[in-house]
Image: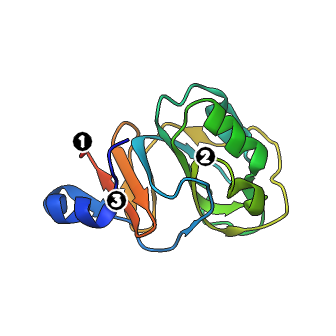
Amino acid sequence: MTELATADLYDANEDQVQVALPMFADYGGRLAFCGPIATVKVHEDNTLVRKALEEQGDGRVLVVDGGESLRCALVGDMLAELGRDNGWNGIIVSGCIRDSAVIAGIDIGVKAIGTNPRKSVKLNTGQRDIPVSFAGVTFTPGEFVYADEDGILLSKQALI
């Protein structure tokens, strides 16, 4: 991947990008990641997260709208490994993850609001591949996300 620095991308494309509010921590072994957006919208149920990560990622980033719930984790080490193995570049969770110490050693980008050891329920509820809004921006499937230690940028077209 080409060198990624969100500050430089912002400076070069200020009029073409959205900047997510700085509410996420870095957990994955890859701190800088980017790719086309795929989305799931769930509430304390990670069934659709698993289904998405079981598919070939082809360099995409899975954006999980968990409604900012802090009551349970939507991604753990097994899902992070599944995503890495299937070619996903990253996962952004508007909610919690678990197994953060293990995820830190997995070569995939993972950003989340926080951690919680409680696992999610498995009800097979939620929606996929729809625009989702959180952190002051809207993540639209097929558009592009760029993330690093400085934050998250969104763009309608590829910037690198």
- The residue identified by callout 3 is 153
For marks 3 and 1, give the CA distance: 12 Å
**Residue 20, quarter of the rendered image:** bottom left
Identity of the residue furthest to the top in this view: 56
The residue identified by callout 2 is 107
Report how far apart the C-alphas of labels 2 and 1 lie in the structure.
25 Å
Residue at horizontal 78 percent and vertical 67 percent from the top: 116
Q: For this view, does 113 lie left or right of residue 103? A: left
What residue appears at the point 48 percent right and 28 percent down from the top-left corner? Answer: 58
Residue 88 visible (yes or no): yes
Give the amino acid type for the residue marked by disc 2 in the picture: Asp
Q: Which of 93 and 102 is in front in this view?
A: 102
Mark 3 or mark 2: which is in front? 2
Relative to 66, is 115 on the left or the right? right
Residue at image position (61%, 46%) is 107
Whether the residues at callouts 3 and 1 have beta carbons within 8 Å, the answer is no
- Residue 63: in sight, yes or no? no
Label 2 sits on a secondary structure element that is loop
Establish if 28 lies above or below 85. below
Q: Which of marks 2 and 1 is nearer the N terminus?
A: 2
> Is label 2 or label 1 in front?
2
Quadrant of the snapshot with the C terminus: top left
Disc 1 marks a residue whose amino acid type is Gln
Quadrant the N terminus occupies: top left
- Label 1 CA crowd tier, 10 Å (few <14, some 14–19, many 20+): few
Q: Do the residues labelled 2 and 1 touch (CB within 8 Å)?
A: no
- Looking at the picture, the colour scheme in use is rainbow
Q: Residue 157 carries which label?
A: 1
